[in-house]
Amino acid sequence: MRALTWQGKRDVRVETVPDPVIKAPTDVIVRVTSTGVCGSDLHLYEVLGPYLDPGDILGHEPMGIVEEVGSEVTALSAGDRVVVPFNVSCGDCYMCDRGLHSQCETTQVKERGTGASLFGYTKLYGQVPGGQAELLRVPFGNTLPIKVPDGPPDDRFVFLSDVLPTAWQAVEYAGIPPGGTVTVLGLGPIGAMAARIALHRGASLVVGVDLVPERLSRAHADGVKAFDLRRYGKDIGDAIRDLTDGRGTDAVIDAVGMEAHGAPLAKAAQWGVGLLPDAVAE
């Protein structure tokens, strides 16, 4: 099969690699039809190279069609359409039973002191081959893949793999009170979805901060009060406090991403957009 492989710092290539095979009776093989490229992949491109080997297959936001199932898989059959979550979690351990799938005790990489294994994400997280490939071996076929209906295009479902859960959890962690207010720093895919989710969950005001015109226009169309950082600069905090009777918003979500260190928008978090620092969710 063809797959996107890491070959060295700032060197990724599409190469021909062996097809994955069933290794455990609960494995499934998925033919990937769509996969996202995450901001987290930039860390692999740059700083996490010491934890990668040449040939490692990248990618952790895939969906596709089940090609083959292991002998103990009962929840899926060949031909089923599935989304594959980023976390490799069993669904049955102590942590998974409590909804803490990123700390799955079955796949925790204890020797590295990290959490559950992740698809396509270095030795720190299990060195599991990723989903930017034609085929993907997915363990825990009865509990991990999410079955979705045939018919609608992939972009109706592929965000369930990582982007939408990340944005939803940001809103959850932010602890916006009922009918409360929130500022979202960064209106890329995560920030834009977090803003929409906050509105969906009843926030009375969602403020979005960015400096890309297309992002600002999209957020405005979604009902977000959009602020252009190019206009306000270090006065962005005062502008948001003016909008909220001097209080600032109840919560702040930093959706800029670690890969944007030093960028103007990343600095907005330092300039003060709210009065509740405990409510920041990254």
Image (cartoon, rainbow, N blue to C red):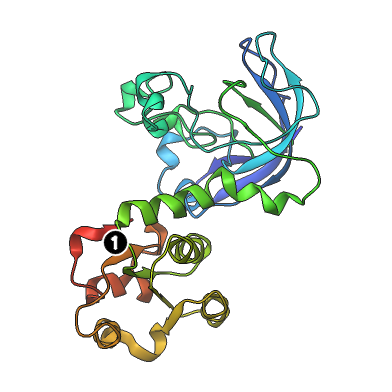
- Please indicate whether residue 277 sits to the left or right of residue 6 in the image: left
**Rendering quarter of residue 135:** top right
- Residue 169 is at least partly visible in this image: yes
- Please indicate whether residue 69 sits to the left or right of residue 9 in the image: right
Residue 13, relative to residue 26: is it above or below?
A: below
Of 66 and 124, nearer the camera is 66
- Residue 133 is at least partly visible in this image: no
- Whole-percent x and y of residue 263? 37, 72
- Please indicate whether residue 233 sits to the left or right of residue 62 in the image: left
- Whole-percent x and y of residue 33? 75, 42
Quadrant location of the C terminus in the rendered image: bottom left
- Disc 1, SS: loop
**Rendering quarter of residue 247:** bottom left
Identify which amino acid the numbered label 1 is placed on. Answer: Pro
Residue drawn at 73 percent across, 25 percent down = 19
Assess disc 1: are there few (<14), some (14-19) or many (≥20) residues with their C-alpha within 10 Å of its C-alpha: few
